[in-house]
Amino acid sequence: MKKNRMRKAFLLPAVYLMLTGAAFPGHSAYLHKKWSYAVQTDTGRTLAPYFIAPTTGKKTPNPDGFIQRWLLLEPINKPNRTNTVFTYTYLNTAFNTEYFPNQFTILPKDGETVKAGEQELTWHALETNNFNVKLFRFAYGYYKHTYAVLFWAVTVVNSPREMKNVRLAAGSNGASIWWVNSKEALLLEGDRRMVMDDGVSNRLTLNKGKNIIRVALINGPGLSDFCVRFLDEKGVPVKDLTISYQ
Amino acid sequence: MISINKLFTAVALYTFWSTQVVHAQIGKPFIHDPSTIALSDGKYYTFGTGGGGLISEDGWSWNGGAVRPGGGAAPDILKVGDRYLIVYGATGGGLAGGHAGKILTMWNKTLDPKSPDFKYSDPVVVASSDGVEDQDAIDPGLLLDPTDGRLWLSYGTYFGYIRLVELDPKTGERIKGNKALDIAIDCEATDLMYQDGWYYLLGTHGTCCDGPNSTYNIVVGRSRKVTGPYVDNMGREMLKGGGKMVLAAGDRLIGPGHFGRVVVEPGVQKMSCHYEADLDQSGRSVLGIRPLLWKNGWPVAGDNVKPGTYEIESERRGYALGLKVDFVRMPGRMRFNRNADEPVKPVPSQELADVIKTWPTGNIDLRIDDYMFRPQQKWTVTPVLEAGGYLGGPYYKIVIAGTDRALAATADAEVTTVPTFTGVPEQLWRIDQLTDGTYRIMPKVIPNSKESLALVSSGDSTPTLARFDMNSDNCKWNFRSH
């Protein structure tokens, strides 16, 4: 972890130069062009082994309760000079700004596109065999910006019964906000490393049937990812759920 | 007539005293040679030398009123089934008298003298000394062996051996044919306890009954068998004077002796004793109750949290409890790769005044994160003596240092901070030092609830209130002074 932090620290000056386009418009076009060129010259990118194509079978949380089926939106560009700007005040603005229509209610379909400013972005239905969802690799695999980005992800958790006093437990590299059935459940601020069960919501209720879980994650430089599961009153992972795209 | 200035000074001194002294109990906790504390009908009791003893409604405020006939010295209490077995010594008086003594037992269904069931059985002699032998039958201590239900009695003083005899747990009488075993020397006020496969013999060494000059201190040895041999951490038998320190003088309390243990619940144990002299209470002999810790298989007296300003560190990850407020950057950036000859100077820490205007003025929720000694992470912990207490401790208020912003439980069993401490029960906190040295923090009440919950890490970064589990580091905290 320390090594990772050091690397992160050393990346900062370079990333800072790349990402301050808004502050230095004279440099912006050049830097963006250079960045795009670097991306496009790598033609061998793949989502494997981090993601697998969506399946249609029944999907339950993994043995530790982590949710592995998601609809992921290609990242929105969100320049930031440092991850230490992710304070509550900043995030409350950043996460409550509308970047694309119906962003707080949408339950998208695989391949559906949205317009976020000048960007046209696609939702991708994906699954992972990992406990965590590696957003950096998702962005990298689709030749999108990997740093200074804002991700959106949605999934549907189906509960066989009403479950009271459960908690959403998440970790994220980058700051993140989590909604359960459109209600804010958790906000992880600051320059986060992804740690399982880092932040935990207050007690909440999962409805019998469909529950929509939505997350937005913001990062400057960093290997963006998240993991999430539900814990019961005793802190035991909730596993008798099914996960679907709709 | 007392002057106004003197009155203010007296009030100020009392206020200072009342918020600083938290080690002795409050009320009139004056006693010598206290028994192990027993809970009967919702109240705590301890008996002392000379008859009578103390009663407490909450375990923190103690006053006279307990009733024990027979006079004599240094009783002990043990609950066996649904009855209480009381044992005491009728002696020639030790230092000033002879050493012919008797140990007597008697039963009572309750320790509450107001109860219709309060009635002592006739005392029965279970051990004695003839005044000549190397033994003085005084200072009894009882153990009901949790492994086999057998009942044991240790007794004796500095005059020769500490002895062990077996009693019948149904009658309280000596087992017929049982011969006394010598198990220690140089001790008095012994007591026995069992923990994790070991039997522990607690004894008091040093000089009794000399006020602030008493050198009393509590020591321990252990054995795999209740019959000994009891040895200390250096392998010295207590029959050869061995003993590892459990508690000596400190914090203006001198001469601890007469150990007793109360197992409150898994992970929470208390030890009782007397201090020969409490310098804050006229140098009188007072009841002491403190946490009992276990370190490497040895009992050690713990400490109630002292008033002060602390980081409240979660045992789960080592993160610190703090307000959910914006991180405010300190001036300055990366400072390495500088000219080594450049003069160095101190950099001020971030202070409350630097950040408090950025904080909301209403309730502020909490998080747990890496400690950076920022104002939102510094907590001032102060006992609120008038708010009552629990066994061995007062309730505390916990506020952000330099403010009146107080930690509080919410009706939905979460935690928050309120702008001003008002003294309502959900802002009062019970703090128990656990057997492993960490602390449990519990609100006095949760609004609209009868549940007893503790401050818990539900995640690395998230505090909540939940049931206490000694096996989980989620439930444990440290008060760190930096």
Image (spheres, rainbow, N blue to C red):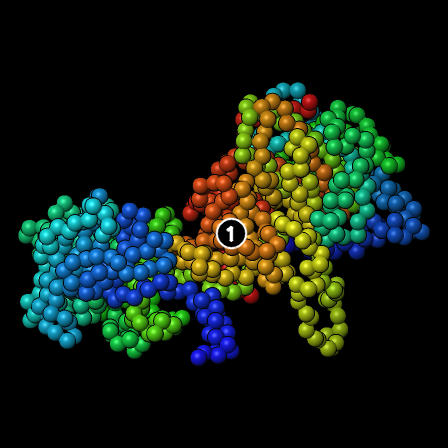
Residue A1 higher or lower than B285, as above or below: above
With respect to residue A5, does A92 lie above or below? Answer: above
Give amino acid for label 1.
Val
Q: Residue furthest right?
A: A26
B282 or B431, which lies in front? Answer: B282
Q: Would residue B63 be seen by someone viewing this image from the given angle?
A: yes
Q: Nearer the viewer, residue B108 or A145?
A: B108
Residue B404, image x and y in percent? 59, 59
Seen at 83% across and 49% down, the residue is A19
Q: Residue visible at 19% across and 65% down?
A: B50
Outermost residue on the front side: it is B1
Q: Residue at x 45, y 41 (%)?
A: B451
Residue B87, position in %: x, y?
Answer: 17, 56
Q: Secondary structure at mark 1?
A: loop
Query: Residue B37, can we see it?
Result: no
Does B481 sit above or below residue B388? Answer: below
Crowding at dot 1, Cα within 10 Å, few <14 / some 14-19 / many 20+, comes out as few
Picture quadrant of residue B327: bottom right
In the image, residue B62 lies at what x, y percent?
A: 33, 60
**Subunit of mark 1?**
B
The residue indicated by pointer 1 is: B424
| Residue appearing at x 51%, y 38% in the figure | A235
Of residues B149 and B99, which is closer to you in this image? B99
Residue B347, how many percent across, how many down? 69, 70
Give the side of residue A194 with respect to residue B247, left or right: right
